[in-house]
Image (cartoon, rainbow, N blue to C red):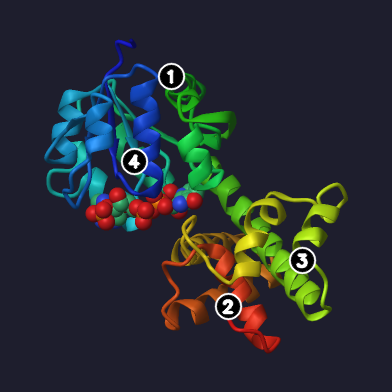
Amino acid sequence: MSDQAVGFLGLGTMGAAMAANLARAGFPVTAWNRTPRPQPDLEGLGVTMAATPSAVARATDIIVICVSDTPDVDAVLFGPDGVAAGARPGQLVIDCSTISPSATRDFAARLATVGVDLVDAPVSGGSEGAQKATLTIFCGGEKAPVERARPILEAMGKTITHVGPSGSGQAVKAVNQVILAGAYLGVAEGIVLALKAGLDVEQVVGALGGGAAQSWVLANRSGRMLDNDYPLGFKVALHRKDLGIALDLAREMDAELPVATLTAGFEDDLISDGHAEDDMSALARVIRSRSGLPG
Ligand code: NAP
């Protein structure tokens, strides 16, 4: 059992699984979710539920956040009853949400004024990675707080890399999401071409698995594209949010990202057609329907 009390804010698809893994690793965990709902699995692991983020901050040493977007992290940190209202010098906040790199630097500077360190630690590896504690995690911040965060992150993930100062973890995550845009679109196009060509798609996926087209998306998401059924996963709306972050960063850096831009447009269409909550592999809907298949 660790003597570091850990707080967890945001018990969504990712957060609930990550908080459970912290409890399984022996950390005493106090958790909070904006929308109160019964958490029998977490409570069964000994997790204590608190009423507000400030109550979590008062009860713990290290606070992990996993909420949706930049304004949500802002609200959890600095809103009424936010972390800052209950924080004390020497605490550490680890933000595992995927948010803006520049806002992260601003949040870190504001927390520093009350003696609290912030490490940005966005994650990759999907809901499966969160459940199995095999997430890939990119950390931004000073060396000492990142090393202090490491045992917490090791309870939730497998590959933890300190990539630079505050905001760098989020910048690496933006790169990750841009690469994923191309990977999902490429697999969707390949699956649709295989279907249209009358091939045995499952056999095609197996055959390609040993070659250069092999990828996590091909192995784990081509089945959904074939079945035209997209259970979560990772919501289209969340990837669109991440592409917004990446495209803002690209504009700041004068980089041109044609595939990410195309994917963002397809995701906007999916969201207006009511598919915001589908898994991101629903990008195949766009390619399927443009090719005359049910989408
Ligand atoms: P999710 O299932 O939609 O859960 C979102 C969580 O954020 C919920 O607990 C929600 O609380 C909370 N939240 C949203 N806005 C809030 C606010 N203003 N104040 C307080 N709490 C708020 O999302 P998720 O899939 O767990 O994703 C969480 C983060 O991880 C996102 O940044 C996402 O980009 C990132 N991520 C997700 C995946 C994935 O595969 N799902 C993979 C890597 C990274 P309520 O219950 O009250 O709505």
* Mark 4–mark 1 distance (CA, rounded to whole Å): 22 Å
- Quadrant of the rendered image containing residue 135: top right
* Mark 3–mark 2 distance (CA, rounded to whole Å): 24 Å
Tell me the quadrant of the picture where the N terminus can be found. Answer: top left
- Residue at 73%, 75% (x, y): give it: 192
The vertical placement of 145 against 12, above or below, is: above
> Residue 148: which disc?
1
Specify the amino acid type for callout 3. Val
Q: Which residue is mark 2?
A: 266
- The answer to whether the residues at label 4 and label 3 have Cβ atoms under 8 Å apart is no
Residue 27 visible in image? yes
Q: Earlier in the sequence, mark 1 or mark 3?
A: 1
Q: Earlier in the sequence, mark 4 or mark 3?
A: 4
> Residue 201: which disc?
3
Cβ(mark 4) to ligand 1 < 8 Å? Answer: yes
User: Mark 2 Cα within 10 Å, few/some/many (few <14, many 20+)?
Assistant: some
Q: Nearer the viewer, mark 4 or mark 1?
A: 4
Q: Nearer the viewer, mark 4 or mark 3?
A: 3
Q: Nearer the viewer, mark 1 or mark 3?
A: 3
* Mark 2–mark 1 distance (CA, rounded to whole Å): 41 Å
Q: Position of residue 134 (x, y in %)?
A: 55, 33
Q: Nearer the viewer, mark 3 or mark 2?
A: 3
